[in-house]
Amino acid sequence: MDTPRIYPRWIESKIAEALLDTPVVLLAGPRQAGKTTLVSQFTGRGMQFVNLDDEATNYSAQNDPVGMIRNLDLAIIDEIQRVPQLLLAIKTSVDKDRRPGRFLLTGSANLMALPTVADSLAGRMETRILLPLSQSEMENQKTNWVENVFVGNIPTATSPVLGDDLIERVLGGGYPDAISRPTERRRAEWFRQFINSTLQRDVRDVAEINKLDELPRLLSALAQSAGQISNYSRLGAKLGLDGKTVSRYINVFEQMYLIRRVDTWARNRLKRVVKSPKIQLLDSGLLSVLAGVRKKHVQLDKTIFGSVLESFVFSELLKHVNASDDDFSLLYFRDADKFEVDIVIENYAGQLVGVEVKASATFKEQDLRGLKKLSSLAGDQFKAGVLLYDTDQTRPLGNNMWAAPLSSLWGS
């Protein structure tokens, strides 16, 4: 049997750095993203490994959280959201002994959204997010696309990925176990099992939801409308749910790092900006399975590929943002006249980079209208506009606009 491939993870050095000066470090992200594999590499530093997915360990932690933590000095605690009572015990222990690097936690939920957790570890814990593999991690490339564009380095692709090869990458996504499957059919089966186990088991750790059967239907509906402006009431009506219930369930999906709500970019002088958020699924492989998009379908009709490709680009950029030492926000732009830009990256100084995504191997002047509108509104704050599409060359379009290969996201 082949040994599973271990990929380099950008975030590893940041975890090691945080352990040098922070008592508690949390590595959060979705199930099966590679958190356990990554933190296991720190056991050589004398850290004891505690797995809360183990039934006996979980039982012990539930019944005596204080006693368990008292008996630990340096520890890795995996899937901490399974027993959130441990967090208060960790706070008590850390308040008595503030040595850095005492606890390295993993969690498949946003713990800061759980009641009482945000207060209990404020100032004591640093959180890092691990999403499924980026294409750069798969290729062992360390260039940060977002940082590069903001300093004026125009993206190129040294080994362009085009056509069917690009489609396969996008539909495969980034979950390590999924991309290790030999066929599209086997990947789809892995995702179906992943969805069932995640929604049936892990939801109970973060929310009190009685009708768990409603969650897969809503997640599938969100996949069908990925990249679109969300209307919770309209979406709920299709499923027999009210808007408040839909909003609550979406909160749960977001806590579990399955989706991301994306706010619109706005300035005070914009009087007619659309305010509703977009929904993006954070893995294009998961999205393609939920939406029923297969390679053979895309080869016949590229139009069905657009939303999956946009989510793919969004998640790739988010991984670059998470790996950066600088602060960036991912937004979108759409005004009442339907000028729009798929992704707007904003830095701490309010400077912008607009990113438009096209599935085709050609583009038209019309495809630049949103970037041009954003540039005119942002003025001097507009750093660059990049149209990413299925090409092998980067071309200047004038006025800080560029057309670049989609594979420049990991090959520049």
Image: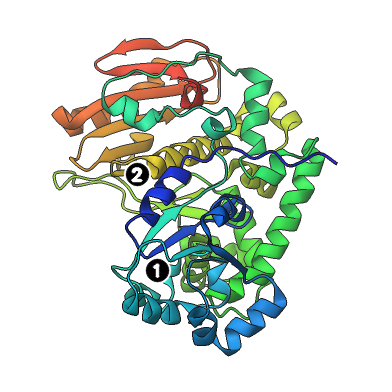
- Within 10 Å of disc 1 (Cα), the crowding (few <14, some 14-19, many 20+) is some
Q: What element carries label 1?
A: helix
Is the residue 232 above or below the residue 1 in the image?
A: below
Q: Residue at x 67, y 50 (%)?
A: 290
User: Toward the viewer: 353 or 3?
Assistant: 3
Up-down: is 52 above or below 354?
below
Q: Nearer the viewer, residue 366 or 123?
A: 123
Which residue is tagged 1?
112
Q: Where is residue 226 in the image (x, y as percent from the top left)?
A: 53, 47
The residue furthest bottom is 63
Task: Report the quarter where the C terminus lies.
Answer: top left
- Left or right of 231, for residue 54: right
Check disc 2 and report the residue beneath it: 331
**Colour approach in the figure:** rainbow
Q: Choose mark 1 or mark 2, whichever is in front.
A: 1
Q: In this view, does 117 lie to the left or right of 286?
A: left
- Disc with the residue nearer the chain's start (1 vs 2): 1
Q: What residue type is labelled 1?
A: Met
| Circle 2: element type | strand
Image position, residue 296 (x, y; %): 76, 29
Placement of 194 over or under 201, stated as above or below? above
Residue 58 drawn at (x, y percent) = 64, 78
Q: Can residue 135 be seen in this view?
A: yes
> Relative to 98, is 331 above or below?
above
Asked if marks 1 and 2 touch (Cβ < 8 Å), the reply is no
Residue at x 14% of width, y 28% of height: 380
**Residue 306: percent from the left, percent from the top?**
55, 33
Residue at 35%, 77% (x, y): give it.
120
